[in-house]
Amino acid sequence: MPKNKPAEFIRFNTIKEYVNDILKMRSSDSAVKQFIKEFDLKVEEALIDAGNIAKGDKRNTVMDEDITPTIEKYLGKKHLTWQETAEEIIKQNPTDLGKISKTINDYIEKDQKKK
């Protein structure tokens, strides 16, 4: 995609139809265009950030671990329940599980030294 042409992720008619069909309202063309312009810009920024994270990890594939922090940066963090947190931890690869385990053990040891 040429650098001088803005990215287009959502289409004008998609927004117009949603407002009309789902919200049961009309929308001005200028409002829809403004929404699309700002939304597309943020999507592009988020994808660039995710790509930079992947490149920083020496990968040429954008993966979940690149998208998650990017979504949190642009949309906010999702607060997980304890069960959801445990499920996310269990999904990690063995190397990351080892790092998580070490971090927890270091925290416990540090806390015990305080007492």
Image (cartoon, rainbow, N blue to C red):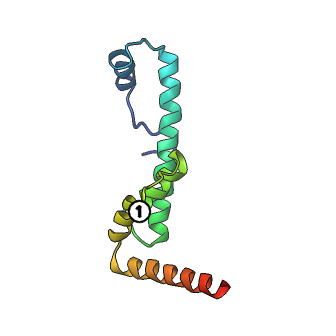
- Crowding around mark 1 (Cα neighbors within 10 Å: few <14, some 14 to 19, many 20+) is few
Between residues 48 and 84, which one lies in front from this camera angle? 84
Depicted 6 relative to depicted 23: above or below: below
Depicted 15 relative to depicted 102: above or below: above
Q: Which residue reaches farthest right? A: 114
Is residue 75 among the parts visible in the rendering?
A: yes
Q: Residue at x 50, y 79 (%)?
A: 104
Q: Which residue reaches farthest top? A: 26
Query: In the rendered view of the protein, which quadrant contains the C terminus?
Result: bottom right
Image spot of residue 55 (x, y percent): 46, 67
Residue on which the image places disc 1: 85
Identified by mark 1, the residue type is: Thr
* Residue 93 falls left or right of residue 58: left
Between residues 38 and 114, which one lies in front from this camera angle? 114
Image spot of residue 99 (x, y percent): 45, 80
Q: Residue at x 35, y 25 (%)?
A: 14
Image spot of residue 101 (x, y percent): 44, 81
Snapshot quadrant of residue 110: bottom right
Image spot of residue 29 (x, y percent): 47, 16
Check disc 1 and report its element: helix, strand or loop: helix
Q: Which residue reaches farthest front? A: 115
